[in-house]
Image: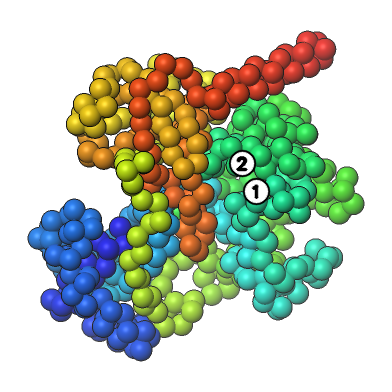
Amino acid sequence: NVALINALGHVVVTEGLEDKAFVASRCDTEAYQSWRTFIADPRHSPEASEAITSVPAEAVRQAARTYATAGNGAIYYGLGVTEHSQGSTMVMGIANLALATGNIGREGVGVNPLRGQNNVQGSCDMGSFPHELPGYQHVADPIARGHFESVWGVKLDDEPGLRIPNMFDAAIEGTFKALYVQGEDIAQSDPNTQHVEAALRSLDCLIVQDIFLNETAKFAHVLLPGSSFLEKNGTFTNAERRINRVRKVMPPLAGKQDWEITQDLANALGYPMRYTHPSEIMDEIAQLTPSFSGVSYEKLEAYGSLQWPCNAEYPEGMPTMHEINFPIGLGRFAITEYVPTEERATRRFPLLLTTGRILSQYNVGAQTRRTDNQHWHDEDILELHPSDAELRGVRDGDWLGITSRSGHTVLRAQLSERMQPGVVYTTFHHPGSGANVITTDNSDWATNCPEYKVTAVQVEKVSQPSAWQQRFSSFDEAQRGHLAKAQQEAS
């Protein structure tokens, strides 16, 4: 991906396709010249990148010309870009390309991530990163931190917290004691499942709050009921920064909305929270977050939705960002050196596994596996090219043992010419498949986003489930037995 985006930039620079007026007025000159020298290097040419990407040089040249001369050029990307060890570098390269061609700051252009779920943007906005407070205010900023300390009545650490992979490592070391998980099934969705399970078992206290008994809940010391979007008031914020109201249409089956349960937990632990409605939480967000200072439930009701920043300068929100300038001042180009992944195919692991989703199942399948969608996709299978199958004597429907540097699992084979020779593919919607038993801890250098798209594996015909799958089946049966017993006692 990075080699390809650099090759596109190489064509833009060497063929003079840049928007020089935009660059001169909106970008840091020194950073631009450094990037221009870097990207014009022949090693970034489409011909040089073809050996890495297998994308024909002429196709790259045509794509670069089309994008740069289109008038309006927008870039959209998804998890196929970011779930790599160089995902952040790739996004920087995309931003470089948009800056160089002037495709920033007006309608119909821009760099547009396609979020995997409906409130990814909103959770990021509200400080889900371990180094940021709500509104992307860094924890090391004493002024921003002081505002939160005065309202929350506590002293905040000026050092970033742990990312999820760091939490797992610290739990196994014994220095991370407790975890509160809401609406995420890390035991199934995160890579290197056996490492995740070891971390969950190491915790002194694991609290899981969800609408279903998911895989993570089976390790929990405390289960708290979640509420669906139909059972609670609040907001979702989508990928275009649009804040949308969510309105409760039925009482929560568990008796309380998510935020009320979290508030009760905080009060029980000795930190007082006294909200009576999510609108009061939004009022506090507006008080502490400059980009949300003009947002209120009253205004959301009046306008239907708002796009942040919404403040005194933009009282009705800002549909298009960066029309005049950037939050950092002048736009900065980043040097995006291509660094190959450390996960390599070898004689022992000659195939590369990539994982993904299918339309009929949603993410880990905790919701969709309970519906008739099961008729379309009732198991995770391993797709492989007929030439790789022939080398191993594999036919459609054979059970295949898949082994990586992290673990071993067993899936049914499906021959597929949509896969390139040397590449195999599976989904991760069914917990018993163990798809993430074989994915590794490799992750992005900046964000720790797992490298789900590249895992070196070997496959061979087998006759029984893997040892992990057998342990999973026994554990799953025991946990469901506990649940059935509890339900029987309750009735």
Label placed on residue 130? none
Three-letter residue code for mark 1: Phe
Q: Is residue 5 visible?
A: yes
Label placed on residue 168? 1
SS class, disc 2: helix
**Does the CB distance between marks 1 and 2 fall below 8 Å?**
yes
SS class, disc 1: helix
Residue at (48%, 62%) from the top-left corner?
445
For marks 1 and 2 on the same chain, the one whose residue lies earlier in the sequence = 1
Comparing 247 with 363, the one in front is: 363
Comparing 410 with 66, the one in front is: 410
Q: Is residue 247 visible?
A: no
The figure's colour scheme reads rainbow
Residue at (70%, 78%) from the top-left corner?
143
Residue at (67%, 76%) from the top-left corner?
141
Q: Residues within 10 Å of mark 2 (few under 14, many from 20)?
A: many
Q: Position of residue 281 (x, y in %)?
A: 71, 54
The image quadrant where one finds the C terminus is top right
Q: Position of residue 385 (x, y in %)?
A: 23, 32
Q: Residues within 10 Å of mark 1 (few under 14, many from 20)?
A: many
Q: Tell me if residue 54 comes above or below residue 405 in the rendering.
A: below
Comparing 270 with 413, the one in front is: 413
Residue at (20%, 63%) from the top-left corner?
49
The image quadrant where one finds the N terminus is bottom left
Task: Give the residue at mark 2.
Answer: 196
Q: Position of residue 80 (x, y in %)?
A: 36, 49
Q: Tell me if residue 79 comes above or below residue 101 in the rendering.
A: above
Left or right: where 205 falls relative to 19: right
Q: Position of residue 338 (x, y in %)?
A: 33, 66
Three-letter residue code for mark 2: Val
Most extreme residue toward the left, as rendered?
Answer: 58
Separation of residues labelled 1 and 2 (CA atoms) = 6 Å
